[in-house]
Image (tube, grey):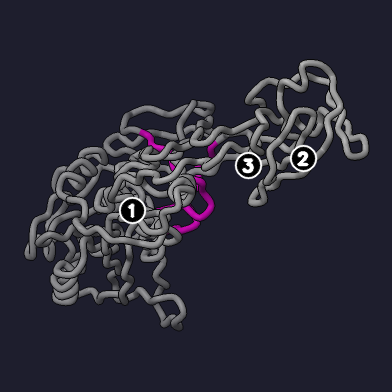
Amino acid sequence: MNPFGTLVSADDALDTILAKLKPVAGVETVKLEDAAGCVLAEDVKSTVFVPAFDRAAMDGYAVIAEDLHEPAMLKVVGAAFAGKPYKGVLKRGECVEIATGAPIPKGADAVVMVESVQVVGQAVQFKQPARQGDHITRKGEDIAKNDTVVKKGTLLGPGQVAAIAITGKARIKVFSRPEVLLFTTGDEVVAPGKPLKDGQVYDCNSFAMLTIARRAGANVTYRANVPDTEAALRKVIASGARKYDLIVFSGGTSVGNKDFGAEVIDHLGDVYVRGVAIKPGKPVLFGVVGNCGVFGMPGYPTSCLLTAELFLAPAVRKLAHNEDTSRVRLSAKLGHEIKQDKTKQQIVPVRVDENEVAWSTFKGSGSITSLSQSVGFISIDAGDGVIAKGADLVVNVIR
């Protein structure tokens, strides 16, 4: 295998990758209970008012405000609960016990909180005045009929799904999730659940990448490990490129005698990224075969997971029509100094303690506990200096 050429920056690599990928074209109709994590493919407009009626915002008593210009004793003539409204019409000198969410009785124009009154037998003593509209949520105050509740292109989380549900819509159109084929290479790699032979290791990279890809919005197909031969890798990628939107594998991306990833992609399509100036994670590979993007991730677990977080996750989000590129970030202070690498951006996994101090958990590219014990990572630019202990920094949380 030819050695790496000029390494590109992480930002340039990601820009190149995203420029070569197009969102999937499919749209499907799903039940609302299955929509979480999907991206909405239509504007959802409400066909109803929310709330559909004037309702009580507090537990208390529905009254006619004019009755309470001065302290008064009002007769309790009934009760109203959510789903069980008071059927009568309120008259002067009367009040209705009312629960939060219950429809406001006809004739009433205010609600007085239960904490502000004193019950005396079948009557209630009111000592404070009330104003029209007190503690009443008006019909359509939250959502008016024909309002756009959630816009096309929105990633559906619990708030968005609930907002659609409150309008009564049971099915919605969403963009199809990208289909991703995922596997590892290497004669030594064995799927969990099988016995290990001498020199073999369990596959952890696939499960890290699988989790990242699914969280980003993909349907993932996990297949058995591919042997360390050029013919085997070529067969799997050629076949997969006809069926999937994205292929992701780990291993076979460096410059060893059995690292065939770049040659296979170049033979079947085009290579656009080969080697990124980051540490760990240099042997990142990306190309396109037909209409299918193909990622090759480093074989070492820490390198694989970090590069999948940096490049695979945003790639899947683009395929899934998810335009949210924001990250969850924490502010922290560095617990120890870090020497800069002269030529590479360092991606350092860290934990953050109760004092908001970040400590490196990096043990080596081959140690999965570097990340299992971390909350995320910090980025240290290339340079010839030292990042001092106590320096302010930003931790990128891995979700």
Q: Quadrant of the N terminus?
A: bottom left
On screen, residue 266 above or below 221: above
- The x and y percentages for residue 199 are 39, 76
Res 181 → quadrant: bottom left
The residue segment tinted magenta is: 358-380
Would you say 242 lies left or right of 161 here?
Answer: left
Q: Position of residue 139 (x, y in %)?
A: 52, 36
- Residue 180 part of the magenta segment: no
Label 3 is placed on what type of residue?
Pro
Question: In the image, what residue type sits under mark 1?
Answer: Ala
| Contact, mark 1 vs mark 3 (Cβ under 8 Å) | no
Other-residue count near label 3 (Cα within 10 Å), few / some / many at <14 / 14–19 / ≥20: many
Q: Which x, y percent locates residue 196?
A: 44, 80
Circles 1 and 2: CB distance less than 8 Å?
A: no
Which residue matches tag 1?
Answer: 308
In the rendered image, residue 278, in percent from the top left (x then y), is placed at 30, 43
Secondary element under disc 3, as helix, strand or loop, is: loop
Measure the C-alpha gap from mark 1 to mark 2.
Answer: 58 Å
Q: Which mark is residue 97?
A: 2
- In the depicted view, which residue is nearer to us: 212 or 24? 24
Relative depth, front residue between 196 and 92: 92
Identified at 39% across, 46% down, the residue is 47
The image's mark for residue 103 is 3
Question: Which of pointers 1 and 2 indicates the residue nearer the eye?
Answer: 2
Question: Which is nearer the eye, 148 or 371?
Answer: 148
Please indicate, yes or no, whether residue 376 appears anywhere in the rendered image: no
Say few, some or many: other residues with alpha carbon within 10 Å of mark 2 (under 14 / 14 to 19 / 20 or more). Answer: many
Res. 295 in view: yes
**Secondary structure of the residue carrying numbered label 2:** strand
